[in-house]
Amino acid sequence: MAALGWLTPRRRSATARSVLAGEAAAEAARKSSIPAEQPADQPTGRSAGARPAAAEEPEPDFPVVGDDRAAAFFDLDNTVMQGAAIFHFGRGLYKRKFFERRELTRFAWQQAWFRLAGVEDPEHMQDARDSALSIVKGHRVSELMSIGEEIYDEYMADRIWPGTRALAQAHLDAGQKVWLVTAAPVETATIIARRLGLTGALGTVAESVDGVYTGRLVGEPLHGPAKAEAVRALAAAEGLDLARCAAYSDSHNDIPMLSLVGHPYAINPDTKLRKHARALDWRLRDYRTGRKAAKVGIPAAAGVGALAGGTAAAVALHRRRR
């Protein structure tokens, strides 16, 4: 797979390597995006099932129907999907004997810690990156793409948050493009985006020569400031007005990306992001327990046990503009 990469979260501005990573991610995303006239694959998991037959339409204010200069950007891990995509992918590779049991134990520990802590720990993320690079080096891109499709069905499809999926659908219904933005490999992210019917994905880009992974990255993992650079580069290439765009994330590491757009949303936020979002009056929504986000002005919504409930939440969340 592409450089399965995370790097230590850094409180810094973008470096030349993060700019390179962002530009590479934007270029890869545009090459693999789904054309508007081409129907996307239908979501396969129970959580990502078909949209309900009857759903209230969002108010025309936001998202603005037919605004082709607006788009939405969604973080993946713990925003769209429960847990981290890289760990689910690692489980699938182990099942196919890509590595030994001791390496699976490492992946399992990282996943368990991630679920308990709900944040991206520097040591664990660095370890995940190094492990993944060594596992995929020498494998063909096409081989990992094919396996990735199977792994999505086995481990990821039922871990999609219905509420976040409904938010993305609201943008699609308005005729806007919707992109995943993640430190996960761009190939994995693209598979997930396609299976959810989204436009495409910005992800970590790994170097390959003649279709074979070299074990090196293009720039650095798409994390923190690099995500913001990727969104900025894609917006420039697509002719988007970031002030009219929306971004969604659970992590304070994504504050640079959220700060780029006119409509930032904190979804299942960690403590630091929740505090930051409240201070700046950003919208908040927590789908982990089904409770309302603790923020004045967010209307009550239906539960998130089914996509219908998630759609109701999406409608409520979009009723008020920033």
Image (cartoon, rainbow, N blue to C red):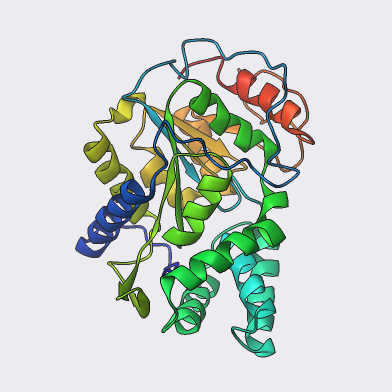
Say if residue 151 shows up in the picture. yes
Q: x%, y% of residue 205?
A: 35, 64
Q: x%, y% of residue 31?
A: 32, 50
Q: Residue at x 38, y 65 (%)?
A: 221
Toward which corner of the image does residue 57 lie, by quadrant?
Answer: top right
Say if residue 298 shows up in the picture. no
Q: x%, y% of residue 20?
A: 23, 60
Toward which corner of the image does residue 5 lie, by quadrant?
Answer: bottom left
Which quarter of the rendering shows the C terminus? top left
Q: Is residue 21 left or right of residue 153?
A: left
Q: Is residue 311 left or right of residue 24?
A: right
Residue nearest the viewer, comparing 188 with 279: 188
- Direction top: furthest residue: 60
Q: x%, y% of residue 161?
A: 67, 42
Q: Residue at x 39, y 37 (%)?
A: 35
Q: Taking 163 as reference, is 207 above or below it?
A: below
Q: Taking 250 as reference, is 312 above or below it?
A: above
Toward which corner of the image does residue 13 lie, by quadrant?
Answer: bottom left
Q: Residue at x 57, y 53 (%)?
A: 77
Q: Taking 243 as reference, is 180 above or below it?
A: below
